[in-house]
Image: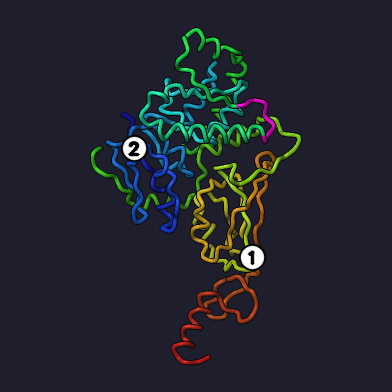
């Protein structure tokens, strides 16, 4: 039985008590994952090892001890197979995120098929089958929008005879040169990446976890997708799609008139998609580092930070960061702390609030 682990330094609930993320809870087919009082817990003996939580988690905080999506993908690409099925090393197709399935489709020279035949006799299919179909629909939409001529297929193949399966898998073998190319890509990727079952396990934050949180790590699957995009054919036209049609990244707007430059959004961002300089003189956004965890939106009290309604696929092929807002930085007359100055007295927000509270106590208007 696979053993499920949670790297709490990656979980957005560890760094943000206001986080509303519940992806892992909603996809768990056996309802063992719970989030109560911002504490994530699960019972290992209840877990069926499908890997769905790891694929659904925006920061890939969950993992199985005997399955690595990245290693599986590279092994898959090194073979002549074009069928993703739980009858092989894959615990469940739901263990692969839309991002990872898209990467496989972009890397592969052949059309990829998701074999949902085994779902007919699988107890967790009541949850996972819909997830698989939704991800396949998203990937196919993105492939079409990117003008990639390799649609993803979803078929029931397990009922076929072995000779029929072989005919499907041998539509065209990957050449030796292709295998060598995949091996080179794998090595390049690896060079870029840092090298009691019945009891409920709840996360406990340590000093080491806090140090990891500060590292601002992008999930490995995002690095893989970026490599796949570099090798994909650049479309003649960059389509703009609805934000609802992409689950793993975003574009953002920021209302400069309401933003207080509290710095929480980019400090809380787990991947560094939002950033600034040491003075906090601007807020910049990189959509290729965004994992759509929404943690930044959860902490923005004036709701100045907003998701755009559309996403441009140009971000995938011509990546470029964007400055959302720029601040006029002055030093506070009271505490000498740099702050975003919007006119009036040279007082930072903290000193302004303290001044207002003091005046109220003194009865001074």
Tell me if residue 150 is in the magenta stretch.
Answer: yes
Residue at image x 47%, y 53%? 214
Sort mark 1 into few (<14), some (14-19) or many (20+) by Cα contacts within 10 Å: some
Q: CA distance from mark 2 to mark 1?
A: 44 Å
Residue labelled with disc 1: 256
Residue labelled with disc 2: 30
Percent x, y of residue 83:
52, 20
Tell whether 348 sits left or right of 310.
left
Residue 128 image label: none
Residue most toward the right? Answer: 236
Magenta region: 145-151
Residue at image x 55%, y 75%? 348
Residue most toward the bottom? Answer: 363
Percent x, y of residue 47:
32, 36
Percent x, y of residue 13:
41, 52
Tell whether 6 sits left or right of 140.
left
**Any part of residue 89 in sight:** no
Residue most toward the top? Answer: 163
Percent x, y of residue 166:
52, 10
Tell me if residue 142 is in the magenta stretch.
Answer: no
């Amino acid at each position: 039985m696979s053993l499920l682990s949670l790297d709490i330094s990656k979980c957005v609930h560890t760094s943000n008590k206001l986080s509303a993320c519940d992806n892992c809870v909603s996809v768990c087919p056996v309802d063992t994952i719970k989030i109560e009082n911002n504490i994530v817990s699960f019972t290992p003996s209840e877990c069926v090892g499908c890997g769905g939580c790891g694929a659904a988690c925006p920061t890939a905080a969950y993992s199985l001890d005997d399955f690595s999506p990245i290693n599986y993908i590279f092994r898959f690409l090194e073979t002549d197979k074009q069928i993703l099925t739980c009858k092989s090393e894959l615990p469940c197709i739901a263990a692969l995120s839309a991002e990872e399935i898209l990467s496989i489709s972009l890397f592969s020279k052949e059309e990829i098929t998701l074999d949902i035949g085994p779902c007919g006799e699988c107890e967790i299919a009541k949850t996972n089958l819909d997830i698989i179909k939704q991800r396949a629909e998203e990937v196919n939409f993105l492939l079409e929008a990117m003008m990639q001529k390799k649609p993803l297929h979803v078929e029931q193949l397990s009922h076929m005879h072995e000779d029929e399966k072989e005919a499907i898998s041998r539509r065209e073998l990957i050449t030796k040169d292709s295998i060598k190319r995949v091996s080179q890509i794998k090595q390049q990727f690896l060079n870029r990446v840092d090298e009691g079952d019945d009891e409920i396990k709840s996360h406990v934050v340590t000093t080491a976890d806090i140090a990891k949180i500060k590292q601002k790590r992008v999930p490995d699957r995002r690095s893989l997708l970026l490599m796949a995009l570099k090798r994909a054919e650049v479309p003649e036209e960059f389509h703009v799609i609805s934000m609802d049609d992409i689950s793993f990244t975003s574009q953002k707007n920021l209302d400069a008139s309401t933003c207080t430059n509290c710095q929480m959004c980019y400090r809380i961002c787990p991947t560094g998609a939002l950033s600034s300089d040491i003075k906090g003189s601007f807020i910049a956004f990189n959509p290729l580092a965004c994992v759509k965890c929404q943690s930044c939106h959860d902490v923005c009290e004036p709701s100045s930070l907003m998701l755009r309604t559309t996403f441009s696929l140009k971000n995938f092929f011509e990546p470029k960061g964007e400055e959302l807002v720029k601040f006029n930085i002055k030093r506070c007359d009271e505490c000498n702390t740099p702050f975003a100055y919007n006119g009036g007295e040279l007082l930072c927000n903290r000193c302004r609030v303290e001044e207002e509270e003091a005046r109220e106590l003194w009865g001074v208007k």
